[in-house]
Image (spheres, coloured by chain):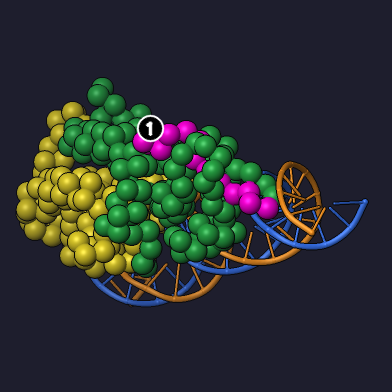
Chain colours: A yellow, B green, C blue, D orange
DNA sequence: ATAATTAAGGATATTTTTGTCCTTAATTAA
DNA sequence: TTAATTAAGGACAAAAATATCCTTAATTAT
């Protein structure tokens, strides 16, 4: 058996986050990148990345344009687009609201065995996800401090 | 598309944790429970739970005995068995060491875009997992404060 | 010894996640 | 208007996680 899951984000979500970081900032139609460039930059399967980008477009995090010179650009100011939005668009809100031990109705009146201990962790985590913007992340990458692949 | 993953633990691991909590404490051979009781108590598929218990036995978290009145008991003092051990046995150490954004070599010299932000979360989380013992969790359940199902 | 009980473990099945392929739609350039 | 480029989206495929079934092994009681 190889139970090797238990990560914060799905693989799909990881691709989505790195892809979003790579898409040039600004809602002006000037800067744009395309599928091929994105999947090369983040080292992801092209066809699969296409599906992920579709979801991000449907969730209004990205704008897409077809045809030559088409591609993807930010929908709005990337300093006002937060990590939590991407996670929520791809993985849903389980990370924010789900029970750590899988109870259907885990709550103050009917808590799982780690409810309170996890509450603190979750607040820490969601606080960070809500306060980390795309520019926070993209700046690090553009400055060569952080990386999107390997 | 229904990308609804992104949880701390795999489903398998959640079963494992709740199962461990249900197994009576003490390394003495007095108290023991069996597969049927466990999967009823935590509402899990019996055959699948059997596989999980096997892994826990192999990882020396539980002791198993076959035959009538056989079953499962703790291997050691449950106040010295920690949540992190169960998570590690089932999900591996990705939650503790893996990169949040999936980079193969995410480290101080080659960090992903959220490396430092996640470092704090991870330390918080692993600190909690390392310090939460089975008795911490089981006591709550035995006192009717916390629950293993629904 | 025999039957009953319970875990171990191999094989297989189902579901979910991840990934591919191909056709269509939209846009641009020549 | 035609060809080229790029995203959208349906259908399908592969891999991983979750789940079931059945046989074997160990133990206990009769």
Is B53 magenta? The answer is no
Relative to B38, is A131 on the left or the right? left
Vertical side of B4 occupied by A146: above or below:
above
Q: Which residue is drawn at 18% across and 54% down?
A: A84
Locate residue C7, reporting x and y percent: 63, 48
Vertical side of B1 occupied by C7: above or below:
above
Locate residue D4, reporting x and y percent: 36, 58
Evaluate whether residue A73 shows in this view.
no
Quadrant, the N terminus of chain B: bottom left
| Residue D12 found in image quarter | bottom right
Residue matched to label 1: B80
Judging depth in this view, the residue of B135 and A77 nearest the camera is: B135
Vertical side of C27 occupied by B127: above or below:
above
Relative to B10, is B71 on the left or the right? right
Locate residue D24, reporting x and y percent: 80, 49
Q: Residue at x 15, y 49 (%)?
A: A123
Judging depth in this view, the residue of B70 and B52 nearest the camera is: B70
Which chain does tag 1 point to? B
Mark 1 residue crowding within 10 angstroms, few (<14) / some (14–19) / many (20+): few
Q: Is mark 1 on a helix, strand or loop?
A: helix
Q: Which residue is drawn at 50% across and 57% down?
A: B38
| Residue B36 found in image quarter | bottom right
**From which residue to which does the magenta span run?**
B68-82
Q: Residue at x 35, y 32 (%)?
A: B97
């Amino acid at each position: 058996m190889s139970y090797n899951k238990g990560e914060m984000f799905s693989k799909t979500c990881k691709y989505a986050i790195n892809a979003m970081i790579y898409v040039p900032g600004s809602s002006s139609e000037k800067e744009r990148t395309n599928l091929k460039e994105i999947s090369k930059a983040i080292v992801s399967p092209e066809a699969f990345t296409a599906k992920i980008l579709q979801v991000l477009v449907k969730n209004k995090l990205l704008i897409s344009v077809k045809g030559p010179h088409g591609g993807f650009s930010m929908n709005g100011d990337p300093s006002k687009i937060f990590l939590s939005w991407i996670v929520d668009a791809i993985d849903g809100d389980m990370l924010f609201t789900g029970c750590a031990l899988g109870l259907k109705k885990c709550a103050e009146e009917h808590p799982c065995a780690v409810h309170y201990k996890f509450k603190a962790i979750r607040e820490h985590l969601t606080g960070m996800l809500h306060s980390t913007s795309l520019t926070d992340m993209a700046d690090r990458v553009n400055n060569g401090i952080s990386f999107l692949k390997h």
